Image (cartoon, rainbow, N blue to C red):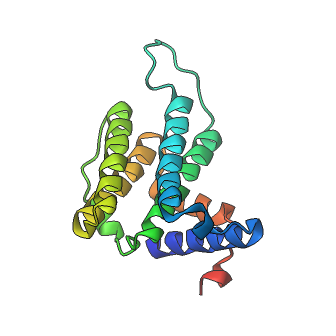
Amino acid sequence: MNLDQLFKVQQIMENNIKKLSQIDEDALGKDNVFDLRFLALQVKVGELANLTKCYKYSKTKEDISKDKLMIRYIDAMKYLLSIGNENNFSIISIDSINSVAKKESIIKAFGEIFDDITHLKYNIQHNNFIDGVSRYIKLFGEFINLGDNLGFTFEEVYSYYIEMSPCTTKNLE
């Protein structure tokens, strides 16, 4: 598994989207694009939480197909990778991500992820690269742990992401 490849695939997809949509990010404003990425990540993580219904007190939980969960999970991951690419955080390693403490509760995992998104945004806005990288590693690790709590291995997520992306491995070289 190659973490660098995930960042590269995301960058290629975004470049293709920019070409096809002909949207000039400079015209939108750097601050607006920055805020848009973070809002999109929060929305996608929220959609994933909503799909799980983990926040409800109901005794019975409906079974959610693994494919639906994976699609929502990957949607959020795209924005996490995008933020990493945009802020030069793609230097992180799988070992650093694996060092993040795991949360046993899916509810605590979602809560930590939302908190870390806010802290990461603050660090970036205040040009605090070192704390930003640390927070990004923590956020990425918590996101991977969330996937584990949802029943995904990182290898499954990686394979699904690579398989479902319109980029081929020949574009990565």
Q: Nearer the viewer, residue 72 or 117?
A: 117
Q: Position of residue 75 (x, y in %)?
A: 58, 51
Location of residue 93 in the rendering, given as x and y in whole percent from the top left corner = 34, 71
Residue 14 is drawn in which quadrant? bottom right
Is 89 placed left or right of 62 in the picture?
Answer: left
Quarter occupied by residue 89: bottom left
Which residue is at a point 51% across and 63% down the rendered structure image?
Answer: 82
**Residue 137 visible in image:** no
Q: Is 101 left or right of 84, judged from the image as shown?
A: left
What is the number of callouts on the image? 0
Q: Is residue 146 above or below residue 154?
A: above
Which image quarter holds the C terminus? bottom right
The foreground one among 119 and 76 is 119
> Hey, which residue is sitting farthest right in the picture?
20
The residue depicted at 29 percent of the width and 62 percent of the height is 132
120 and 170: which is toward the camera: 120
128 with respect to 161 (left or right): left
The residue at 54%/44% (across/down) is: 44
Name above or below for residue 131 compared with residue 145. Answer: below
Please say whether residue 95 is visible from this viewpoint: yes
Give the image location of residue 147, x and y in percent.
45, 47
- Residue most extreme to the bottom: 173
Q: Residue 79, how many percent across, how many down?
A: 52, 56
- When the figure is inspected, residue 42 is found, relative to residue 14, above or below; the finding is above
